[in-house]
Amino acid sequence: MHRIIRTTLAGTAGATALAALMLVPSGVAESADHLDPPGRTDGGVDPNPDIPADIADVFAWHSNGTTKIAMTFAGPVSAAATTPLYYDRDVLYKINISTAAPANTPEFTISYRFGRGQNPGEWGVRIEGVPGVDGAIEGPVETNLEKNGVKARVGLFDEPFFFDLIGFRETRSTGQLRISNQRNFFDGQNDTAIVLEIPDANLGAGVTNLGIWGQTARFGGNI
């Protein structure tokens, strides 16, 4: 379960940097989506889907001298739902970062896992392998964490993806274009996610292209 994007990092700040930012499919490795592979993560295929290990999307962007990376998983779920967040101590999450060719071999691998706190419902996270960070970043979820100039937060976030899934399905079934940019299927839904803000200098001098993708692995197989 992984999705790859490539970013072009602008060398200047402000509007020029934002205009130069490119988010395009890499083409150097497979891309994946929600419920992929369906035999493990799609409730329509597996009656007991491995929701915590299901990566949704990986986003990356650059501004003000830092690279921001967000990997969403275990979603989307309705913001009004009472379903607990999908923290699972037996899933290992990875964010791979390639700073040099070939783009599908990482120079950095950020890994993180969850652990239970002392009280019911408490969870913490341990993040390792972050460029420029000595040791691990660790602390409770839903908390802004910071170490060696790197910022991190893991918890529940608004689903950032905008898409008319209803119109897409109607288009496929009728053969007529029914997609509308006024309808967002994911509005009012949430994802669990990790968000990192890493100074560009931590990724290496002169780096202008990044290959970024996520992976999950379950200890002991499926649920």
Image (cartoon, grey):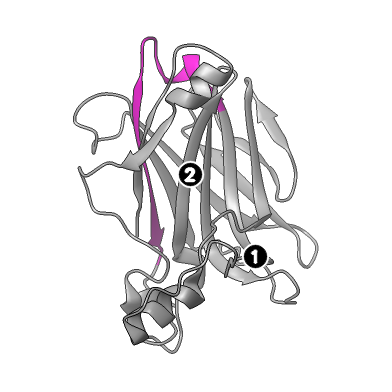
- Circle 1 sits on which residue? 187
Under tag 2, what secondary structure?
strand
Q: Residue at the location (57% across, 70% down)? A: 185
Work out whether residue 168 or residue 80 is closer to the camera in this orientation and state it: 168
Asked whether the residues under the numbered discs 2 and 1 touch, taking CB atoms below 8 Å apart as contact, a structural biologist would say: no
| In-image side of 131 versus 158 (left or right) | left
Q: x and y percent of residue 99 in the render?
A: 32, 25
Q: Percent x, y for residue 217? A: 38, 59
Residue 12 picture location, percent across and down: 50, 11
Residue at the front extreme? 176
Identify the residue shown where x is 60% and y is 19%. Answer: 64
Snapshot quadrant of residue 192 = bottom right
**On the rendered structure, is 31 left or right of 171?**
left
**On residue 48, which mark appears?**
none
The disc, 2 or 1, on the residue closer to the chain's N-terminal end is 2
Is 205 magenta? The answer is: yes
Give the secondary structure at mark 1.
loop
> Which marked residue is nearer to the observer: mark 2 or mark 1?
1
Q: Relative to residue 220, is residue 131 drawn left or right?
A: right
Answer whether residue 209 is magenta in the image: yes
Looking at the picture, does residue 197 appear above or below residue 158?
above
Tell how many labels: 2
| Residue 222 shows in this picture | no
Regarding residue 44, the answer to whether it shows in the image is yes
User: Hey, what amino acid is under mark 1?
Assistant: Asp
Q: Which label number is shown at residue 59?
A: 2
Residue at image position (68%, 29%) is 146
Q: Which residues are magenta?
A: 198-219
The CA distance from mark 2 to mark 1 is: 18 Å
Identified by mark 2, the residue type is: Phe
How many residues crowd mark 1 within 10 Å: few (<14), some (14–19), many (20+)? some
90 shown above or below 15: below
